[in-house]
Amino acid sequence: MKRFFGFVKKEFLHIFRDFRTLIILFGIPASQILIFGFVISTDIENAGIAFLDLSKDEISTGISDRICSSGFFSRTADLAGYEEADRVMKSGRAKAVIIFPAGFGREFLSGRQTTISIIADGSEPNTATLITSYASAIISDFNREYTAPGMTAPLPVQPEVRMFYNPGLKSHYMFVPGVITLILILICALMTSITIAREKEFGTMEVLLVSPLKPSQIIIGKVMPYFFLSFINVIVILLLSWLVFDLPVRGSLALLLAETMLYIMMSLSLGILISTFTANMQQAIFISLIGLMLPTILLSGFIFPIENMPKIYDVLSSVLPPRYFIVIIKNLMIKGKSFSYVWKETLILTLMTIVFLGISIRNFKIRLE
């Protein structure tokens, strides 16, 4: 065990002596969280929607059918009461809830002013804006087309829009969780993917092979320094998000940090796995950056909602760890959910970590032979 900790200390010293490594570890995350915050923009086309129809008349049914038949929305739930609105959005089944008040059709036909409430999930500001805009436009079209007998003017229906979780529709609520997800997997996987490849390329692998350390100790020893340094990265990112962009952590901070530590360990394990299959640092860097960056940006749900993708892309994204972590971090940071809402994603990341570490250790043993 003393030799093992001595090996870990050597890895820390090696990192601190390499200025380029420190720049990658601490400079890139800080610059990305600031740059991405001001330049990222998104768009979306479709979303699940739930209805709370307290009127249940011809007019409310006609409007809800018009909304669902537009091609922009799909009905995911019919609610029985107001208390179900928050629950259906927290579960992820609906991006918005449309509420028809009691007596809506009667007020509509009498020509008196009436309202339809549209409650959207503001944790994805661009999605929420698009949902409310499209729904309001469909309601306005219905309002113009449907005229009561003897009336020559459109009937007055006023959409009333509210946002859950992010009332101000600040874009930071969308990009910060996504950037944290992207930064951690890129930095952690990149750093550890080149660590064993560097030993091979510099000819120092023989020193490790003849050392009394077991393969599992070498693998874990390579991971540990980057684990602690990446955790410092998370603290820096959260502080920048709070101080610069005024983004709070509504859920349990301890649970958020614990989930982040799990994701860091999974990313480091993935990097070690890449390093055991590559012959040099160039290959490791190429696989880590190119092979992980684009799938994380395009298929994790960071920018493009997964539910809008063709089924094949949904299947491909299901094997990407960032897809699950971005659900966890949004639920904990922005929606303030408890562990009961993210336990499935946590279990998947845990299994991935075990599998990646297991394959890495097994593959390293084969190389030792």
Image (tube, rainbow, N blue to C red):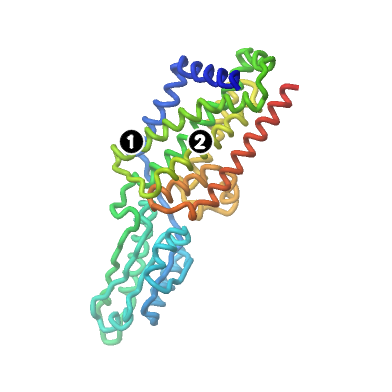
User: Which mark identifies residue 46?
Assistant: none
Q: Position of residue 69 (x, y in %)?
A: 46, 69
Marked residue nearer the N-terminal end (2 or 1)? 1
Secondary structure category for the residue under label 2: helix
Q: In this image, 66 relative to 262: left or right?
A: left
Reply above or below: 340 against 97: above
Q: Position of residue 155 (x, y in %)?
A: 27, 77
Label total for image = 2
| Type of the residue with mark 2 | Ile
Q: Position of residue 224 (x, y in %)?
A: 53, 27
Residue lying at 39% horizontally and 26% vertically, measured from the top left: 27
Q: Position of residue 227 (x, y in %)?
A: 50, 30
Task: Please identify the residue farthest to the bottom as the structure is shown.
Answer: 150
Residue lying at 58% horizontally and 33% vertically, measured from the top left: 269
Reading the image, the residue beneath label 2 is: 264
Q: Which image quadrant: the N terminus?
A: top right
Picture quadrant where residue 213 is located: top right
Q: In this image, 329 relative to 351: left or right?
A: left
Q: Which image quadrant: the C terminus?
A: top right
| Mark 2 residue crowding within 10 angstroms, few (<14) / some (14–19) / many (20+) | many
3D distance between C-alphas at marks 2 and 1: 19 Å
Tell which of 278 and 272 is nearer to you.
Answer: 272
Task: Please identify the residue farthest to the front as the structure is shown.
Answer: 2
User: Which mark identifies residue 240?
Assistant: 1
Tell which of 65 and 31 is nearer to you.
Answer: 31
